[in-house]
């Protein structure tokens, strides 16, 4: 059975069709026709969905969604407080939230355990409905790396996002194990956690020889390599090693950019995480003291160097680092497009091409997704508004009127307000030490017992002071 969608504004991923009615025809899970509505005529009896006044776009793609993180407020939330089984069930709901926001495909570039692989496989098997998922395993890290954030006397537990590799041999072993596990891509952390005391820059956590060997082994096994690299040294090593996708690259120089261009690397900044963490972090948040001030300087530098990379013709992929408390699932994905337009010099069409056609290049379904054309998967969205004039409409509540995945209209309503897992709050009970001096400053002196009266009488008594 064929279904015909008629509209007067259709963006196929590259070109905007507008001015006269356009038709998109779907048969099964594929698009069979995109073009003029007037001819050829629709055979009698075939269903027509009239969405004139609405914009039809390819299903959006976010290449940076961490399904297992659970809108984390802390590293411990990601790595420790929940068992894998619980994280997996939770990740399925989050995947559905992302889908209903108009994102029909995502890349999960770093999971814990095999969480995202399980979600991907359960969707592909038909057990659940969810977006198309291209998944990594744990991100490889060295002792100096971001993925090894634990005190040295703990080590990196199995439940961590990081897979600690202590030698090139261990790194090869981990890559081969992940390939056996069925990962689609390999994620490697190249940023260290320590600044070089002489330069003030972060030191890369692998040296150039190790970086080149790791990327080469993953690529030999047919996997694209995604690298976390914020600072200059990590970006340079990743680019020289020929990594496929470099995340962030906020602080790079001409030497980095030359290597990126020479080796055909793609950049994916995830500025949404950075912007949101600056704008949203409140005085009551533990990171308030350092995050907003320090990160504002990072933004200024990032906008400058990434704008230069765009002008140099480097392909950009679009991702948001969703899965943290400042980048909750389904909420801010399109903000990255807005930032690209506002601050990096992209036109709305270029930003939308990046998040559809460019992003599709790194998907499992790279030859079938990201464009509206005959033969492609029928993944598309119906938008109330004109994202080609203002990409910000994609974030407006209710603007995504319909999401079609493989030709089927999605009607999922995943829960959004759920209770946290009991251990997720950790075991920290107080934020400061109650010395006599502090208690005196807080004017808390005086016995509170024996407490008479109903519960709450202690605070009532204090209120009266
Ligand atoms: Zn990330």
Image (cartoon, helix red, strand yellow):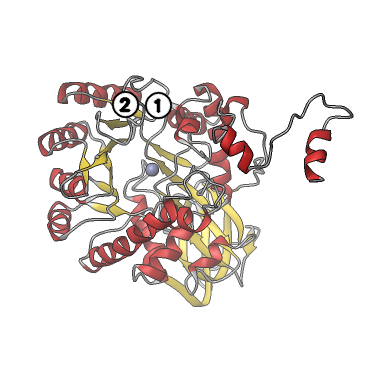
Asked if residue 361 is positioned above or below residue 346 in the image, the reply reads: above
Image location of residue 78, percent across then percent down? 47, 32
Report the residue at 58% width, 67% height from top.
Answer: 6
Q: How many angstroms separate mark 2 from mark 1 (CA)?
A: 7 Å
Mark 2–mark 1 contact, CB under 8 Å?
yes
Image location of residue 42, percent across then percent down? 57, 64
Near-viewer residue (39 or 433): 433
Image location of residue 152, percent across then percent down? 31, 23
> Within the image, what quadrant is residue 164 found in?
top left
Q: For mark 2, what is the residue? A: 163
- As drawn, the label of residue 110 is none
Which quadrant does ligand 1 occupy? top left
Report the residue at 65% width, 60% height from top.
Answer: 398
Report the residue at 50% width, 32% height from top.
Answer: 77
Q: For mark 1, what is the residue? A: 160
Q: At numbered mark 1, what does the secondary structure look like: helix, strand or loop?
A: loop
User: How many residues crowd mark 2 within 10 Å: few (<14), some (14–19), many (20+)?
Assistant: many
Q: Is residue 434 visible?
A: no
Q: At numbered mark 2, what does the secondary structure look like: helix, strand or loop?
A: strand
User: How many residues crowd mark 1 within 10 Å: few (<14), some (14–19), many (20+)?
Assistant: many
- Relative to 236, 278 lies left or right: right
Image location of residue 56, percent across then percent down? 53, 64
Asked if residue 390 is positioned above or below residue 299 in the image, the reply reads: below
Q: Is residue 422 visible?
A: yes
């Amino acid at each position: 059975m064929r279904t015909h969608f008629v509209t007067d504004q259709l963006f196929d991923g590259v070109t905007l069709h507008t001015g006269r009615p356009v038709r998109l025809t779907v048969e099964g899970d594929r698009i069979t026709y995109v073009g003029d509505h007037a001819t050829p005529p629709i055979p009698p009896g075939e269903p027509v969905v009239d969405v004139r006044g609405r914009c039809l776009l390819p299903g959006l793609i976010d290449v940076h969604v961490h399904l297992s993180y659970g809108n984390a407020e802390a590293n411990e939330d990601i790595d420790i407080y929940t068992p894998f089984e619980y994280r997996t069930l939770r990740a399925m709901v989050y995947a559905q939230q992302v889908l209903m926001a108009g994102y029909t495909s995502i890349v999960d570039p770093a999971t814990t355990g095999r969480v995202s692989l399980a979600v991907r496989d359960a969707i592909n098997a038909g057990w659940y409905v969810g977006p198309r998922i291209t998944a990594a395993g744990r991100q490889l890290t060295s002792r100096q790396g971001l993925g090894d954030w634990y005190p040295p006397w703990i080590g990196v537990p199995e439940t961590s996002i990081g897979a600690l590799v202590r030698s090139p041999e261990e790194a090869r072993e981990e890559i081969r194990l992940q390939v056996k596990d069925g990962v689609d891509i390999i994620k490697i952390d190249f940023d260290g956690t320590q600044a070089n005391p002489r330069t003030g820059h972060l030191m890369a956590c692998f040296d150039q020889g190790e970086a080149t060997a790791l990327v080469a082994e993953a690529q030999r096994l047919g996997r694209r390599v995604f690298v976390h690299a914020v600072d200059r040294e990590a970006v340079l090593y990743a680019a020289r090693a020929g990594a496929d996708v470099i995340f962030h690259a906020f602080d790079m120089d001409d030497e980095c950019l030359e290597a990126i261009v020479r080796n055909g690397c793609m950049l994916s900044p995830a500025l949404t995480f950075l912007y949101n963490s600056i704008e949203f972090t409140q005085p009551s948040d533990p990171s308030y003291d350092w995050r907003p001030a320090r990160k504002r300087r990072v933004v200024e530098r990032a906008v400058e160097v990434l704008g230069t990379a765009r002008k140099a013709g480097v392909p950009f992929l679009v991702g948001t680092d969703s899965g943290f408390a400042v980048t909750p699932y389904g909420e801010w994905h399109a903000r990255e497009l807005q930032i690209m337009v506002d601050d990096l010099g992209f036109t709305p069409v270029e930003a939308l091409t990046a998040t559809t056609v460019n992003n599709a290049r790194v998907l499992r379904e790279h030859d079938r997704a990201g464009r509206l054309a005959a033969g492609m998967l029928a993944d598309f969205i119906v938008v109330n508004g004109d994202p080609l004039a203002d990409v910000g409409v994609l974030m407006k509540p209710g603007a995504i009127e319909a999401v079609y995945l493989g030709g089927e209209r999605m009607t999922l309503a995943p829960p959004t307000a759920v209770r946290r897992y009991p251990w997720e709050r950790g075991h920290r009970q107080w934020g400061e030490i109650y010395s006599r001096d502090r208690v005196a400053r807080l004017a808390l002196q005086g016995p509170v017992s024996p407490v008479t009266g109903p519960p709450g009488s202690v605070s009532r008594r204090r209120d009266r002071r």
